[in-house]
Image (spheres, grey):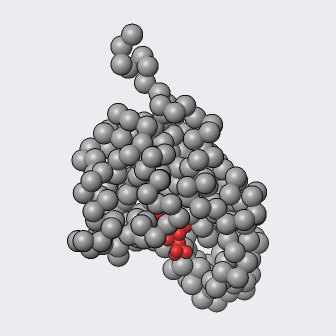
Amino acid sequence: MTQQAVKKPAIGLMGGTFDPIHLGHLRLAWEAHSLLGLSQTEIMPCHLPPHRDTPSSNAQHRLEMARLACADTTSFHVNDWEIEKQTNSYSIETLSHLREHISPDSPLVFIMGMDAFRMFCRWHRWQDILNLCHLWVSHRPGSSPPEEHSDEFQLLQQHRAAQPKDLLASPAGKIHVHNTTALDISATQLRDNIDQGFEPRFLLPEPVWQYIKQQQLYGWQKNTTFSDK
Ligand code: ATP
């Protein structure tokens, strides 16, 4: 049998608050998905503690917005596992859960931005995470790579994969840093803009924006001054 014939499907995971989901998230997931030829990418909104100090929307709204954003893309599957658990999930738990449902030989690729990776070595059981998956780390406007001598810098030195496809040669253990198309969009900025009455159109999928308006999320009100509805 050729190596091609035994190749196992590779799966992606992108977690986040997605409050709201925007084109920065979707482009990041898409570039990893398409460059690696992943068979499916799980988009997993996290549970949020009720005391979160930003004007966030509730879990069902975040889930619904993610579903609307991914509705036309069969490559992405919105996964409600963390939200349904109703407790905070550590990434190691989510990855272990996904691993239980895929072959041990299948590459599992955890997709994140550089701002998230810079904190990686503060995560619960971070040393175990690379036993379960690869990391796909995207450069993000405003986020520089980890400082020399930081734990994240050393981890990168030890596990770096120069080419995206290097992640497909094994189920876990490598880190690829990618120059994803730079989109300087953040959910915090979007929430602030909406609250101040500026429409965030063309920064997130239109159905998500329509949903925000309909549900009056993030302080949006029907008669907001700057609206051009
Ligand atoms: P907030 O502003 O509320 O912190 P966010 O826009 O950073 O939100 P998250 O849901 O926290 O969004 O991010 C989920 C993942 O997407 C993280 O790994 C983050 O690094 C990545 N990410 C978010 N926005 C971008 C972007 N514009 N470009 C690349 N990666 C991004």
Q: In the picture, which quadrant includes the C terminus?
A: bottom right
Q: In the picture, which quadrant includes the N terminus?
A: top left
Q: Is residue 102 left or right of residue 82?
A: left
Give percent across and percent down for residue 20.
61, 69
State the image quarter where residue 98 is shown: top right
Give percent across and percent down for residue 94.
60, 53
Q: Which residue is located at x 58 percent, y 35 percent?
A: 102
Of the pair 60 and 47, the residue shown nearer to us: 47
- Residue 80 visible in the current orientation: yes
Of the pair 195 and 3, the residue shown nearer to us: 3
Of the pair 109 and 138, the residue shown nearer to us: 109
- Residue 34 visible in the current orientation: no
Where 108 falls versus 66 (above or below)?
above
Q: Is residue 156 left or right of residue 212?
A: left
Q: Which residue is located at x 64 percent, y 62 percent?
A: 89
Residue lying farthest top?
A: 1
Give percent across and percent down for residue 105.
47, 31
How many numbered discs, if any? 0
Give percent across and percent down for residue 52.
66, 81
State the image quarter where residue 117 is shown: bottom left
Q: Which residue is located at x 43 percent, y 65 percent?
A: 120
Q: Which residue is located at x 50 percent, y 60 percent?
A: 125
